[in-house]
Image (cartoon, rainbow, N blue to C red):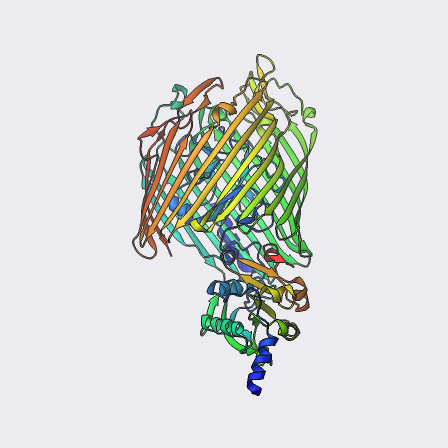
Amino acid sequence: MNKVLGVAAAMALFAIPPAFADVTAKDVQVIGRSLGFLTEKPSGRLTVAIIHAPAVPESQKEAEGLKGLLGDGLAAGAVTLVPALVPADTLAGLETAGVAFVTTGLGPRHEAIFEATKGRRMLSVTTDPTCMKAAKCVMSVKAEPKVEIIVSKAAADASQVAFQPAFRMMITEQ
Amino acid sequence: MSQILRRSVSLAALMAALIPAATPRGAAAQSIDYGSLEQLFGEPVTTSATGKPQRVSEAPVAMEIITADEIRRTGAANIPDVLQRVVGADVARWGMASADIGIRGYNSPRNPRLLVLVNGRQVYADHHGFTPWHAIPVEMAEIRQIEVVKGPNTALFGFNAVGGVVNIVTFNPLSDSVNNVTVRTGTQGYKEVSGVGTIKLGDRGGIRVSAGGYNTDEYETPVRTAERAYRTGPRRRSFSADGLVQVTENIQIGAEVTKVHTEQSEMTFGYQLFPSNYDILSTKLSLAANTALGLIEAKVYRNQLDVNLALGIDYNNVVTVAQVQDLFKIGTDHSFRLSAEFRRNELDSTPVRNGKVSYDVYSGGAMWDWAINDKLSLVNAGRIDYLSLGREGTFAGPSPYTNEDYDRSLTEFSFNSGIVYRATDVDTLRLSAARGIQVPTMNELSVLTSNGTTGTYGNPRINPSIVMNYEIGYDRRIDQINGGLRTSVYYQTNSDLKSYTRRVNSLVSIYDNIGDSKAVGIEAQLKGRIGTDWNWKVGYAFERVNDDLTQQTNYNFEDSTPRHKVSAELGYTNGPFEANLYGMYVSEVEMLRTGSTTLVKVPDYLYLAGRVGYRITENVQAAVTGFNITQAESRLTSGPAEEQRLLFSLSASF
């Protein structure tokens, strides 16, 4: 019974967003190539912390989908992205990652996640625009039908994450 | 060429010396990394619209970008054959090497209205105010993209960007590795060898070196009797070295040297063929730095041009340019570009020396791009140019002017303003207005020709031409065809056009302003893809020109600008095979010819070009390309009829 209640509580906690789409291989390429326009540009193998909540179906599905896309390492731009599943409730393992991917449906956990990523001066990326609009994720991406990259300047500043001037002029900042 | 080789060795040594000994790290500073940005956004990126990097689909001006792959698929061995496919372009090919290109009408021999640059360095020749396309020191395989901006853009590029701008962007020697050898042979005895190589200096430096040349016969179609002796088989020899070094995480330094020699007969502005030999040397240094103040870019370059014509006319023109700009963003919605430029232009008198005309130009400009909201953005760019003219030395012959008449200055303001409204995810509306300045050429200002008794003289009092352009554009992305529609409607006024015409007395005639002209036009292009194998494009351009020229002149734009142009292109790829077919219908015109009084009727025509390529191995491709493939010869201009041309090419990339 406690288990059922726990699941129910988790379900209530992680409200389903109005718009949801699985992360695609093209989204991953956009994320990877965007890293090349950071002022402190990473290179080589870079661990992606896939922050997810197993109790939230869309989060879990997106996490598994992204983990599958990255496999043992996916080259995108100058980096090879390597997946690491990080539970949203504990954020255990976040410290070893170079970039955080915030899966869809983690609204109530956005604040805690952002506290953790900005404390590590870490770029947080999502395909869930609500996280970026709430200034709890630095960047949201959408590859189809046309590449759209939106950066929350407040979140970027708070995370001490900066992009190159040319890149900033080609994206939307909020 | 040994001098050039020495310069290249020096360039390599300079590059090597600049490479830091520190452990290599990922380079953070890029001037504009076209390749990475194109891969990220999935479409070509340009800085030619406003000065800031933009996706071509979001540029607030009418423009086209022709990518390296599209260039290769045309099979063209020269840039005019590529630009012929741009909707709204007129290409007048006067011979195997001589061609003039107009954007939005007003084409003429030695067309002064189209500013052409390679990586931002002008290859437009200031002495006569035109672009000698044959003398652009670029091999086709090293071109990343050709950006064509339609309409005035003086506020960004400076004088002479009035009909349009063509910016040829080459591959980046630091981030791209291009190695290619191409040989071409064909009809008219055409023989060409072209090579491009990239030398990497660790992971922080690179030099791209290119060299090429051709020998060919000239057309054999009839010319005027007086021109027969002037007809010569064109030759070209070209060399270029372009280096870039990542000095620190945030600073790049570049150096470039080019040298080109060409020989050909050209159509001159009196609609007469003349032989000409070109020797052009250019040197350039550039700097790009990511700073707290934004992306700062600076460059200094010098073009030294030596052109020998018949009758002992020998132009020595030196242009020195220093430019600096800062691109930065304030807040989330406001992008800015601040720029300053100094330009010195010098021309020795010819054919009798001892005179020199020069001017200095001091310029300042600003661009402000305001993203008002998700749907609406406003772009404003303005520029002020102050030109100070002078002359020293003696005059040859009975000049109506003294050196004191050349003590003159001009201050000109230009602007580009545009509103972009993204009505939906797929519909975009553009409204724009622009003021462009076409400065008098060195020739129009200074001595042209004199045999000691009679002469045609430049005029220090001649005024710049002013071009105003008002435009509405509508673009729609159409996912059903994997492509989209791009349209423009424009109205253009041209004030104080210039020409040589006015006879001061029986011995002297001078250049002068000759009146005004206005035009209205429509451009539309629809393109798409079918599956992965087929791509297609159709275009239509309408233009109606109304001249109000006050004096007898060697210009007649309203009769020589085609009213209708319809084009279609179809491309197919399947495994190792590639095919491309291009067709163009152009309506009837009348063009001047020899002596500025004779109008020659050029009937409407259908022009076809095509290419078939086969990839022999992963890296080697053979192709046959035909131009004007349905007829042995066609009258496309008032000049010599254009012959059918066939090219066979073998190209290896490694």
In x, y percent, where is residue B426?
Answer: 52, 50
Nearest the viewer among B10 and B186 is B186
Side of B310 where A127 appears, left or right: right
The percent position of residue B594, horizontal first and vertical second, equals 46, 20
Q: Is residue B567 above or below residue B352?
A: below
Q: Residue at x 68, y 68 (%)?
A: A158
At x 42%, y 21%, the residue is B601
The N terminus of chain B sits in image quarter: top left
> Residue B102, image x and y in percent?
50, 33
Q: Is residue B543 left or right of residue B368?
A: left
B456 to B620, vertically: above or below: above
- x, y percentage for residue B488? 53, 38
The residue furthest top is B506
A138 is higher (above) or lower (below) than B58: below
- Residue extending farthest to the bottom is A1
Residue B548 showing in the rendered view: yes
Task: Name the residue nearer the viewer: B8 or B432.
Answer: B432
Count of picture labels = 0
Front position in the image: B562 or B84: B562
Q: Which residue is pictured at 65% across the width and 59% down the height?
A: A174
Is there any visible trace of residue B1 in the rendered image?
A: no
Residue lying furthest front in this view?
A1
Q: Is residue B37 above or below residue B580?
A: below
Task: Please identify the quadrant where the C terminus of chain B is shown.
Answer: bottom left
